Amino acid sequence: MISIKESENKTSEKQIVKESIYNALQQGKSFSLWKAPGVNQTNLIICQAIKMVDDFVLEEGEAGFSFAAFMPNSKKFLFPAELHYQFENGILVKGPQLEITIDKNQVYSETPPKFHRNPSLNKIDDIDFIQLVNHSLQEISKGHIEKVVASRCKDIAIDEQFDPIEKFKVLCDKHPQALVSLVSSPETGTWLGATPELLVSVDRKNTFKTIALAGTQPYTPEIDLKSVAWTQKEIEEQAMVCRYIINCFKKIRLREYEEHGPRTMVAGNVMHLKTAYEVDMTATNFPQLGSVMLKLLHPTSAVCGMPFDSALEFLRKNEGYDREFYSGYLGPVQINNCSQIYVNLRCLQVFENQIRLYAGAGITIDSQPAKELEETEIKMLNLQDLVGSKHN
């Protein structure tokens, strides 16, 4: 057995993360593990208990990791940064004094400790989803809604060797431009995902950012992104999200913002249209823009629909299951003086003997039910492959 302290920071990230999380689970504690897009930096927060909050203040306040459900005015939790470890290029660079005991001979492929789990939920099947899309099209044709984002879930059996920590590493390798996260608590259960969609960010330079992300096509490495052609349906769907963001700016009388796009971006095995928005919070004298926009934007038209109230009410009545934290939001708050909140897409929930996958598709007047079902299947493939994948 060896004892590892902060001064001996060459101990591998894998060792410290696994030992810390396993110890936390055995003690009934909660944790959040994540990697931000485009950087080789991993963060781990371990806390005695998570806190329910009314709203998040992104520009100041307690540091931690946010986790919020899809439905507005529903559950929002903070994983407070009681113990915060940060790794760069696999090496510990920040954290409290470590007293972690690790057995060099321990085989981490053995059955891991039980992660926090919630009871199973009711689900909808493929036939129900086709019916849901048809119902959505009927409401759109009547002029009751302009767009609605219909979603579905799928359950897949797993064996006792399924280790969410190992799968987190697989996702980090496969999706370097996504927020990859693994969160677990008694209140939320255990969720794993890799989302490409930034909802709100505020950096240490007081710069606010958000994006409009919509439209989906399959992606393979041989595709030249400069030659990708988008249909009128996909272009209009993405434009609706842009209008939604701009309307939020108008509500708070914000006129000074930069807009870049739309451009094609890759997210795993799919492509999306992306438009980026940026605001100098100092120049506009809007020091709490991030917190204000978070309340205005969530849930965006990219995961709910337009008009917002009508689309949300339609989903409440017709979607047929509780999304819980799927299409909610998550991300670090006041970690290194930055807050980065992402929409919780491309995610799965871990249960006793199964995982639950979630995916949705934006339905507009030009939608074809079979193609929308196919789109959800393609989105689910990113995580469905995890069931049989193993990281070396």
Image (spheres, grey):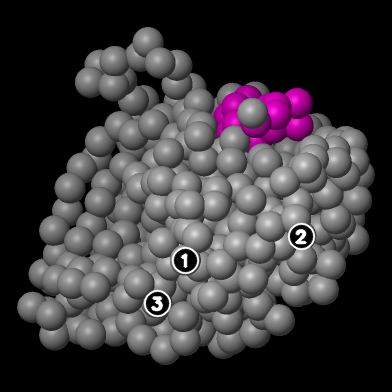
Q: Earlier in the sequence, mark 1 or mark 3?
A: 1
- The magenta span reads 372-391
Q: Position of residue 61 (x, y in %)?
A: 42, 89
Which amino acid is tagged 2?
Tyr
Q: Are marks 1 and 3 in contact (CB under 8 Å)?
A: no
Which amino acid is tagged 3?
Gln
Which quarter of the figure has residue 159?
A: top right
Asked if residue 125 shows in the view, the reply is no
For this view, does 260 lie left or right of residue 103?
left
Q: Position of residue 52 (x, y in %)?
A: 65, 84
Q: Nearer the viewer, residue 100 or 269?
A: 100
Asked whether 255 falls inside the magenta stretch, the response is no
Q: Is residue 352 above or below residue 184?
A: above
Q: Nearer the viewer, residue 331 or 316?
A: 331
Q: Tell me, for residue 334, which label it has, or none.
A: 3
Q: Nearer the viewer, residue 158 or 29?
A: 29
Which amino acid is tagged 1?
Ser
Q: Position of residue 212 (x, y in %)?
A: 34, 51
Which residue is located at x 69 percent, y 57 percent? Answer: 2
Give the farthest residue toward the left.
283
Q: Residue under circle 2?
A: 22
Which residue is located at x 58 percent, y 70 percent? Answer: 98
Label the magenta part by its dominant secondary structure.
Answer: helix
Q: Tell me, for residue 7, which label it has, or none.
A: 1
Q: Is residue 281 above or below residue 54?
A: above
